[in-house]
Amino acid sequence: MPSTTPAVEAVDLRKRYGDEVALDGLSLSIPAGTVYGFLGPNGAGKTTTMRLLTGLSTPDSGSVRVCGVSATDRRSLAPRIGYLPETPPLYDEFSAREQLDYVADLRDIPTDDARDRIETYLEEFDLAADADRRLGTYSKGMRQKTAFIQSVLHDPDVLFLDEPTSGLDPRAARRIRESVVDFADAGATVFLSTHILSVVEAVADEVAVLFDGRLVAEGTADEVRARAETGASASLEDAFLAVTGDAERPESDATQGA
């Protein structure tokens, strides 16, 4: 039988930075195999949430479990998750292939498996011809593709993505969207934070909207529209603006960097 343990479970997360409240009692329960679109205006607490869920930061109160593992147990958690932050950790002096070899070694991926996975991903993301160039010479889009590959190289159970299509041309952005769906179809869970609502509408099973550190809407895109009282024919952008008080207009594909 499929496991009933949530892939991601957060209970009453609270986090302050000085006098500023970043999260104010956030609770989440995300089933395995779900693409979970996590939305919110700048300053809503999205990055803080992702850092707590990946064990990179500690809440003031509340708890996090990922695949049944406490986020405080970094040694047990690390093999289960992949994380692509908005500013990915890349070494400019490495080539893309060296970067991925390095990550594969850190992840204890067997050499033959690592080589096959790296070459497959380099081909899929049109990086094979430039794989031996230094990352310091790469465009933003090429760096983003390399960072995405390193986040999925070990086949994680839960993948956390913070603005994964930032800086990508339409072809590469589509490939990442397809990869997200492929991961979920294979049973993995994808936690996707982005301002580009067309990406969320294309791939997300569930959508959550964070505002001022609180969850103000959650459910399918249709359920979020209903919560916003915008009507079934309204766009997700309209619903987002309604539940956040028009705090910030999210990006469209036309405003996304190429």
Image (cartoon, helix red, strand yellow):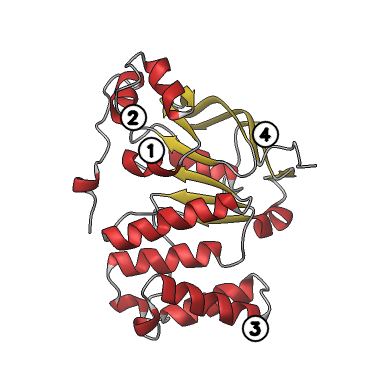
Please tell me the numbered disc located at residue 112. Answer: 3
Foreground residue among 175 and 59? 175
Q: Secondary structure at mark 3?
A: helix
In the picture shown, does residue 103 fall above or below 42? below
Image quadrant occupied by the N terminus: top right
Q: Residue at x 65, y 42 (%)?
A: 32
Q: Residue at x 42, y 24 (%)?
A: 222
Viewer-nearest of discs 4 and 2? 2
Q: Earlier in the sequence, mark 3 or mark 4?
A: 4
Where does the image place residue 121, in percent across and percent down from the top left?
48, 72
Quarter of the rendering containing residue 64? top right
Task: Give me the C-alpha separation between circle 2 and circle 1.
Answer: 7 Å
Quarter of the rendering containing residue 46? top left
- Write down the residue under mark 4: 63
Q: Earlier in the sequence, mark 1 or mark 3?
A: 3
- Write down the residue under mark 2: 236
At label 1, which amino acid type do we have?
Glu
Q: Earlier in the sequence, mark 3 or mark 2?
A: 3
Q: Secondary structure at mark 2?
A: helix
At label 3, which amino acid type do we have?
Asp
Task: Give me the C-alpha separation between circle 1 and circle 4.
Answer: 29 Å
Q: Residue at x 25, y 41 (%)?
A: 251
In the picture shown, does residue 211 fall above or below 176? above
Foreground residue among 246 and 172? 172
**Residue 89 visible to the viewer:** no
In the picture shown, does residue 82 fall above or below 240? below
- Write down the residue under mark 1: 201
At label 4, which amino acid type do we have?
Ser
Q: Is residue 231 left or right of residue 152?
A: left
